Image (cartoon, rainbow, N blue to C red):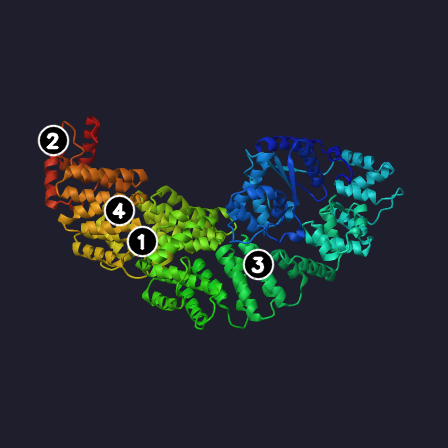
Amino acid sequence: MAAAGDAPAGLVGRDDELAALGSFLDVARTDGAALLLTGDAGVGKTALLDAAVELAVAAGMRVIRGSGIEFESEISFAVLHQLVLPLSAELDRLPASPRAALGVALGLEDGNTPSRIAVLNATLALFTEAANESPVLLVIDDLHVVDQPSIAAIGFVARRVTGRRLGVLAARRSGPDGAFRPTGVPELDVAPLSDGDALRLLSRRFAHLPRRILSAVADDAQGNPLALLEFAGSTEVSGDRAGWTGGPARDVNALFGDRIRQLPGRTRDLLLLSALEGSGDLSIVQSAGAPGGLEELAPAERDHLVMVAEDDRTIRFRHPLVRSAVVDGSTAEQRRAAHRRLADVLVDQPERRGVHLAKSTTAPDESVASVVEVAAQTSLRRGDPGGAVAMLRRAAELTPDPEEGRRRLSQAAYVAAWVSGELDISHDLLHEIKGDPAGQPIGATAAAALLVLATEGDADTAYTMLLPAIEAATSVDGPRTGDVENALFTLTLAAGYLGGPEYWQPLMDLLDRFPNPSPASAATLARVHHALGSMSDELLQRLDAEIAGLNEQTDTDVVIRTALVASYVDRLPECRGALLRVIRAGGAVGLSMPALIHIALDDLYSARLGAASDAAAELIALSNDTGYPLWAQVGHYSAAMAAAERGDLDECIEHCGRIWDWSGPRRVHRLVKCAHLARARAALGVADFDTAFRHASEVCAPGELPPFNPEAVWAATDLIEAAIRTGRLEEARAHAAAFRAAGVERISSRLALISALCTAMTSEPGEAIQRFDDALAISGIEAWPFELGRVHLAYGEVLRRQGRSRDARVQLESARNLFADIGARSWESRSAAELRATGMTRASSGSDLTPQELEVARLAAGGLSNPQIAERLFLSPRTVSSHLYRAFPKLGITSRAALRDALEAQGRSSGAD
């Protein structure tokens, strides 16, 4: 490492590294590039960064520097703050949304919690904006001690610099203390100097020392530049050494410690404040410890331990080992006093103040604990749930009141389980609370119930834990805390998965204590889940307003809970952007799984069947990897439904089997019903109406639309069609009447279309045509192609039965085209078969098969029995038998087994469809 005053370009033994840096800068200033330097402490990484800065400035690049600081690693976005602060003008030019996301994340303004992806995208947008004016080089030293949220931002930008005239150059220490390595970013390992280069460096700087002494220093320093310079600087001409014995980094640290101990006491105090303050802001150091001035820093400057900027606004330690030596050389009481003084200055920065107060206090102190809790809430709002959990734990440790301490621990446990997906931490926290002989707070009950539900699928136990706890917490007047809302939300999930009246009726009674809930609240979710038709127009309007602002919503929990309510009322498309931000953010792993659930459902309802399968597969993998098997089962349901509509019967059966095997023994009845719904739809696709009716009846009995069974709404058309096609017309009509009575058609165009289809399919022949026309006149139905295809198919079937073949072909061709467009192969085949039955597809010229004889022959060749063919074509089994009797001699065969070959040969010879 070059000493102060040396030109970086004159570094000894670094020609290869400097050449690599030059090439990197050439690319960075024209097309964007990223590079990570790695190496041992003192090997010269910082000197190479300095050299790169000099080269970049000479080339006209704007340089922005930041550095990881061990004592700030608990502060969210501390290093990102360093990088953003010089770009205030560019920040003001950003659109409102990314500007607000960065402002809240960095503590520059108040607002809703930004999602991690919003902060990452805003960071990239800011640096891109700066690079639009001139090439920009971001330089980050000591990446191994950078706070985790800043690491995520730096890595995100580093992987997206191409085409942006933006360079990202970072350095990190080798070894297990710095696990972060940005994926896809090239690395340059900085090795120790060779023996020859080490001697050249020493000879240049210490010409007064004999050659034998320089050789001894080189041997001991092992090519480490910092050790070379410090060891040689502490060696006399006689060869006497100032207490170093080998091991470069350790001994250099000891040498720095000796030099620091020789400084005046006031200088050491200021150095300690600077080391613990972390950002290098001299105004904070001055306010905390030197109201009269900073002259006492001069001895440390003269000894080249620190460098003060010319404007006297920032201080920089020569090397991280200097900072470590300053802290290591202080007493515990001195460190606590320094943290306290810094906390007194940082009253307008809650998170940093909380960190310093937490480190300044050893005995329980409620005033300190409350500040630390505020700091935790700030971390959560800024999109750092892991930091929030750590701060809440510390707040609990500092809380003198045991009940209040347990409340803070329970908050940490819930955030760990629901937001950050850290199950082990949540379990540990709950174990701490459980070990306390005092009563358990409702927040701890909510966290424990969520863990039991999501990890074990034990909805019954979760319900049993939560109901009495919520009843007790809401039995007296007073404000409803966030812990109560979390508990009610988890109770609603548990009751929903259980489904029986013995579970939902006590929940509905409890909701009387929650009047006028917000659209995304647990009380609204419970009411909508209980009866979809109970969603009033006024509440729908409020929900629509909430959704309209969801893209600006930075609280990821609000996004998820709003989307959950929206999923019942067909508002998921409007939530999609916000949900994708939650998934891409990466920090809120726990919330990524519910977000993936809603993305998969949105794809499914919108008939993007391949995308739905992909989202379901991602959800299943993430849930299994993180230990949330309940969410994996929801993924299997989405995959099963997508397979059912595509016509992949085997895949659908496999996913349904997984659901039944896992959910059945755990009495998770809702998921069992979901699997029956998927199997019913798959059976309908292949015209297996008996199987479809059997499975659809497991979702709900014909003629009923029971409470707390939302799948009954989605299964209505399946149950009605299966009932009609198996001769249960009265049951079908009763079910259509029950659906109309539920009053859900006003909620969305999809529900209106489903209701209209149920009515049309069960109407008298004279009314059916008008009812189908009414269904197709509903506004907005193009957004639901699968349901729309079913309407055209059912309409065409009715027209064909009434002998209106020409009109039937119009509807059936529309159905076939819709199903073909979305990849619903089995439903496309059903539509094509109906088209052929209208006579649209003719036999070859050499055959006198009628259109209906041809269709009967094809179905028989496909393996269907005479009763099955009759059911599908609305004929009697006797008529089917007659058609086959006449078809055999026309095809030149005598048995059913020869049908397939005869039809294929006929098609080849004629080119017929």
Residues under labels 1 and 4: Cα distance?
Answer: 13 Å
Q: Which amino acid type is marked by label 2?
A: Asp
Residues under labels 2 and 3: Cα distance?
Answer: 82 Å
Residue 174 image offset from top left, x and y in percent: 66, 44
Ranked by sequence position, the earlier of labels 1 and 3 is 3
Identity of the residue drawn at 40% across and 53% down: 545
Residue 62 image offset from top left, x and y in percent: 64, 36
Depth check: give the residue in front, 90 or 197.
90
Q: Which amino acid type is marked by label 3?
A: Ala
Answer whether labels 2 and 1 touch (C-beta < 8 Å).
Answer: no
Residues under labels 1 and 3: Cα distance?
Answer: 40 Å
- Pointer 4 residue: 778
Ranked by sequence position, the earlier of labels 4 and 3 is 3
Please, what secondary structure does the residue beneath circle 3 have?
helix
Answer whether labels 4 and 3 touch (C-beta < 8 Å).
Answer: no
Near mark 3 (Cα within 10 A), the count class, few <14, some 14-19 or many ≥20, is many
Q: Which mark is residue 376?
A: 3
- Pointer 1 residue: 747
- Pointer 2 residue: 848
Q: Which amino acid type is marked by label 4?
A: Ile
